[in-house]
Amino acid sequence: MATTRFDAAEYLAEPEAQAEFLAAALEDGSADEIRAAINTIARARGMSDLAKATGIRREQLYRALGEDGNPEFATILTVLRALGVKLTSAPSKGTPKVAPKRKAAKKAGRRAA
């Protein structure tokens, strides 16, 4: 009996499913896992269409988002915007590894007022 290789891109047709897939990678994934998730979503949408939307050549997208890729953050932002995905920020649970400085916290409070 022949087996076929599983490709998550075949199961991520809906933007909501794609956003959940990326959110899971962002939650606790490594940089490589996040890049791979973006690659999967890009393939689900179609690399040619993404290339047109971003102005980045299809071959460059495959290279940047591929297994050995190390895309610049600007490339990631461009791709996510073209995919209609928005990055948001929320405090994580647990103690931060680096505590905020008191002066910086006071300045932030003054700006907000």
Image (tube, helix red, strand yellow):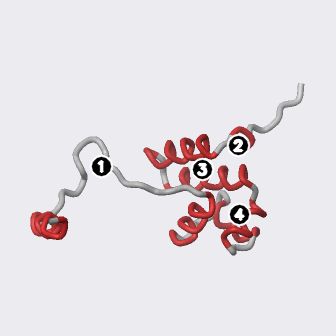
Image depth: mark 3 or mark 2 in front: 2
Of the numbered discs 3 and 2, the one sitting upstream in the chain is: 2
Query: Can you tell which of label 4 and label 3 is closer to the viewer?
Result: 4
How far is disc 4 from disc 3 in space, using C-alphas? 15 Å
Residue for badge 2: 13
Q: Earlier in the sequence, mark 4 or mark 3?
A: 3
Residue at mark 4 to residue at mark 1: CA–CA distance = 31 Å
Quadrant occupied by the N terminus: top right
Q: Which residue is mark 1?
A: 91
Secondary structure under tag 3 reads: helix
Circle nearer the N terminus (4, 2): 2
Identify whether 2 is placed above or below 44: above
Disc 1 from disc 3: Cα separation: 22 Å
Which of labels 2 and 1 is toward the front? 2
Q: Residues within 10 Å of mark 1 (few under 14, many from 20)?
A: few
Q: Mark 4 to mark 2: distance in Å?
A: 15 Å
- Residue under circle 4? 50
Q: Secondary structure at mark 1?
A: loop
Residue 26 placement, left or right of 92: right
| The C terminus lies in quadrant | bottom left
Three-letter residue code for mark 2: Ala
Q: Earlier in the sequence, mark 1 or mark 3?
A: 3
Q: At 72% across and 53% down in the image, what residue appears?
A: 45
The residue at 29%/41% (across/down) is: 93
**Few, some or many residues within 10 Å of mark 3 (<14, 14–19, 20+):** many
Give the vertical position of 88 relative to 14 (above or below). Answer: below
**Pointer 3: what residue?**
37
Q: Look at 58% across and 68% down and name the residue there.
A: 78
